[in-house]
Amino acid sequence: MNGQQLKEEYVNYVRENTHFNLLAGESYEVVTPYTNTYGDGISFTIKYEGSHYIVTDDGFTIWELQLNGINLTNKTKRQQLLNSILNYNGFELSGNEIIKKAKRTTLGQTIHDMTQVLLNIYDLSALHPQNIQSHFLEDVKMYFDKSTEYNVFPDLSITGRSKLEHKFNYLMMSKGKYKLVQVHNKINKEKMDFILASWLDTTENRAKTYSRQEDLYIIISPEGYKDLKEEYKAAFKQYDINIINFENKRKLVSKLGA
């Protein structure tokens, strides 16, 4: 299978299935090709405020989660996870609205980021109370902070051929090679598509900018690894993307250790 061809097919699919519907004034509804946990399409609004744009979900995400018994407004662990997702991606809450201001030059990136943010927030609905005693990303960070077995550089963004920035949680130097790492609690089809798209989109620029080709490793929670579908594993393997169960510390050291 040709990686460049797949990338072009995926970009064309997203382009053809992302719709911008004019609302009142100079506002647009963005309808993405992705669906949330409840099977509803993920959409949000762009509002022009004269000097800048506001990208907002109009409060729909928290409303829908609350409708399904998931409370993100009280002082709960889920609220901490919500705030962590928002802060990491530069978004904020205004009442129950998830928003971010953007300039015209950064609007495309903000649309891209909003889609990823909403997918991650809807993932919180799949977590059982006993599984959210600690934030998985924080658990991983704490592990690497305490360990002396890794050379870790956190929070790296790489610009792809599409001119969009793609976030990686870590860059690691392991056995003389650079390795990129993303951390995910669970992986569904939409998240798999995002991972593959970002990896393919950055291939050319990674080679040009860094004169190297890193490997990509996905660290996934024990629960997420248990639920990971075989077809997703096969798709990642097709592009030499490595999946590591966070519970398997021996494999972590073997694959990512200095």
Image (spheres, rainbow, N blue to C red):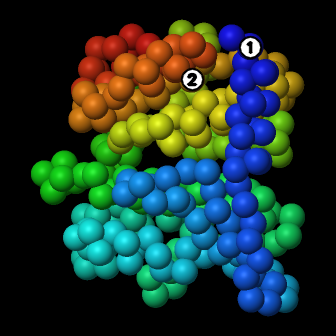
Q: Using the image as rendered, state which of residue 226 and residue 15 is in the foreground.
A: 15
Could you tell me if the residues under marks 2 and 1 are in contact, i.e. CB atoms within 8 Å?
no
- Residue holding disc 1: 2
Name which residue type carries label 2: Leu
Q: Which of 168 and 125 is in front in this view?
A: 125
In the rendering, at what x and y percent does residue 153 appear?
A: 56, 36
> Which of the marked residues, 2 or 1, is nearer the chain's N terminus?
1
Type of residue at label 1? Asn
From the top left corner, tell me how far across and down residue 36 is, in percent: 44, 55
Q: In this view, does 44 lie to the left or right of 183?
A: right
Q: In this view, does 118 lie to the left or right of 101?
A: left
Q: Is residue 5 above or below residue 91?
A: above
Q: Which residue is drawn at 15% across and 56% down?
A: 129
Residue 162 position, x and y percent, is 82, 42
Q: Residue at x 51, y 42 (%)?
A: 190
Q: Which residue is drawn at 29% across and 14% down?
A: 250
Identify the disc placed on residue 216: 2
> For the residue carrying disc 2, how many other residues have a C-alpha within 10 Å: few (<14), some (14-19), or many (20+)?
many
